[in-house]
Image: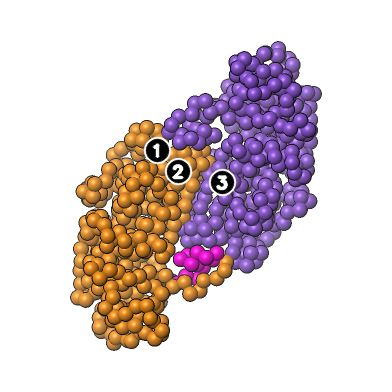
Chain colours: A purple, B orange
Amino acid sequence: MIATFYEGNRSFSVKEKPIVPPGSDEVQIKVSFCGVCGTDVHIYHGVMDKRVKMPITIGHEMSGVIVQVGKGVNDFQAGEKVVVRPLDNRGEKPSDKGHSHICKDLKFIGIDSPGAMQQYWNVPAFTLHRLPAATDLKLAALVEPLAVACHDVRLAGLKKDEFAMVLGGGPIGMLVALVARNEGARVVISEVNPVRLALAKNLGFEVVNPSEVDLLQFAEETTNGRLADVVFEVAGVQTTIDQMTQIAGIRSRIVVVAIHSQPRPVNLFQMFWKELQVIGARVYEKEDYETAIQLITNTNLPFESLITKVQALSDIQQVFEQIEKNPDGMKIILDCQK
Amino acid sequence: MIATFYEGNRSFSVKEKPIVPPGSDEVQIKVSFCGVCGTDVHIYHGVMDKRVKMPITIGHEMSGVIVQVGKGVNDFQAGEKVVVRPLDNRGEKPSDKGHSHICKDLKFIGIDSPGAMQQYWNVPAFTLHRLPAATDLKLAALVEPLAVACHDVRLAGLKKDEFAMVLGGGPIGMLVALVARNEGARVVISEVNPVRLALAKNLGFEVVNPSEVDLLQFAEETTNGRLADVVFEVAGVQTTIDQMTQIAGIRSRIVVVAIHSQPRPVNLFQMFWKELQVIGARVYEKEDYETAIQLITNTNLPFESLITKVQALSDIQQVFEQIEKNPDGMKIILDCQK
């Protein structure tokens, strides 16, 4: 089989590798598709070189079909379509208070152990979610990032008819917006990139470009002074950190979806004045995966529009180089059987 | 009667003034005691000169007795002991979503209109809370700051047996700690001032001095790695903003009680990693006042220990000058009949 390896220094290798049978409590998956996540791009940039053990196969936004099951696996069988929830929480302790998805000793599969950017992949059976037989496996590669969005919207406590503003129209921002709208909220996407703005419009969203329009004034006028009930900060820059407390109305919730590696000045006075809540959100829980699978397989939400390109696994180096050069792109998916 | 006026430039005047009968829907109160709030000290420092209309009578942490009621007031009568919830929410709008205590056009009585540092005070009847006849009116002057603490603890969603850390052992920090402990939480007060540390110890609290001990290590060791379930940031400095995200455990809540007039660097990575919630809290709601009155009148909590001194209203200038010079002090209360 073909496997790819991040070798450091912005380079991937593509190598032949023997197919290994699954161990006890493991399942062997023939990987169908694997999306490229922002985290994968971070790894490619060398930002996580201290954490990843090179050479390493990365990738976690995948879909596939079970080939064989290891000893002790009774609830899955060959031929079933699946996705992996790449959280290895076997190090969970009582001090994690039952929040196993963010337990202190969490290992992220595809970062801390080998991932899905290869043709065959052995994973612990407890990480699997079964897909209906008719599932489009290309779309199913979106289950993982969609589960992130489902988690964010759930932690926001978003209710029908609330007004949500999504700051940043990248892949996760768009998914958050789709999930939020599906919950019955009115959703506006704030974005500066014209290509992403056009895509958001095509998806039927109200959009605003804060480099052309005063965002606070926009929020005030469009809500009759109520401002946003929920803000999703998905852009990860200081400007959106400043905006998030401005455009939030009284007792609003702000979910910080983007990862900020450095402390950021936050307007705590606005938080006090309007009794805002800022909510940190990380990965997903089992129920978010179930919701994401349901949305992918049982609704007509326009997930297809978020897939910019599908390319062969063996083109991995070129794919990562392209992503860097194209800030307009959304999801790039690797076809792992090519 | 005697009334005091903030005249700007760190000075108060004390003047004779005629007693005016209450208007319609108003009540005339003979003010018994009025505590000095941090906000009053801010006003004295000139920080709020743009907001207050000098000369102005300030003060809002009061207790008193009704002298007469104006036209249209049927539910109160002369002789009743009362406290005032100094929030004038008559400008409330639908865009405030029913959160009248922080409505956009809220007027704070004692800042935006005359306050209680005078012998007789006319206030709208809707601001009153009745006290039991046997209430100690000196202690009742603590109802207002205690209601702040009740609000903070309520918004934290603090549960029995949770571990709460209070960063800052000033008057509000101590009140938060007392309310939190009364809810059944284990409470540690973190403070650097030795006099305040000694007082906190006298009140039976576990204490920690973060200038002598590594606070994170302390929190880890004392909770077996669980860290704090709830953090109250009551000190208002960058150090405690840094500490609050460090010592908070997985899915913990952080209530920012202190007022930060400038944006502060906040560790959003910790918020993401541990899925923390940061909650802004401002003043109080009706139910917090009722809880505070209940705690003052029906429990044996050691509120008396928080009163550093009671001084005559006519000494107001000296009182504010002393407060500045004494960082050890807790609550100073003006006796408004002297």
Q: Which mark is residue B227?
A: 1
**How busy is the neighbourhood of tag 1: few (under 14 within 10 Å), some, or many (20 plus)?**
many
- The residue that mark 3 highlights is A155
- The residue that mark 2 highlights is B252
The amino acid sitting under disc 2 is Ser
**How busy is the neighbourhood of tag 2: few (under 14 within 10 Å), some, or many (20 plus)?**
many
Mark count: 3
Q: Position of residue B165 (x, y in %)?
A: 36, 45
Which residue is painted at 28% across and 68% down in the image? B132
Please give the range of residues in magenta.
B96-107
Badge 2 vs badge 1, beta-carbon distance below 8 Å: yes
Q: Secondary structure at mark 1?
A: loop
In this rendering, the answer to whether B264 lies above or below B228 is below
Left or right position of B157 against B197:
right
Q: Quadrant of residue B25?
A: bottom left
Q: Position of residue A224 (x, y in %)?
A: 62, 67
Badge 3 vs badge 1, beta-carbon distance below 8 Å: no
Instruction: Quadrant for the C terminus of chain B, please.
Output: bottom left
Chain identity of mark 1: B
Question: What is the C-alpha distance between the residues marked 2 and 3?
Answer: 14 Å
Which residue is painted at 37% across and 45% down in the image? B160
Which residue is painted at 63% across and 34% down in the image? A39
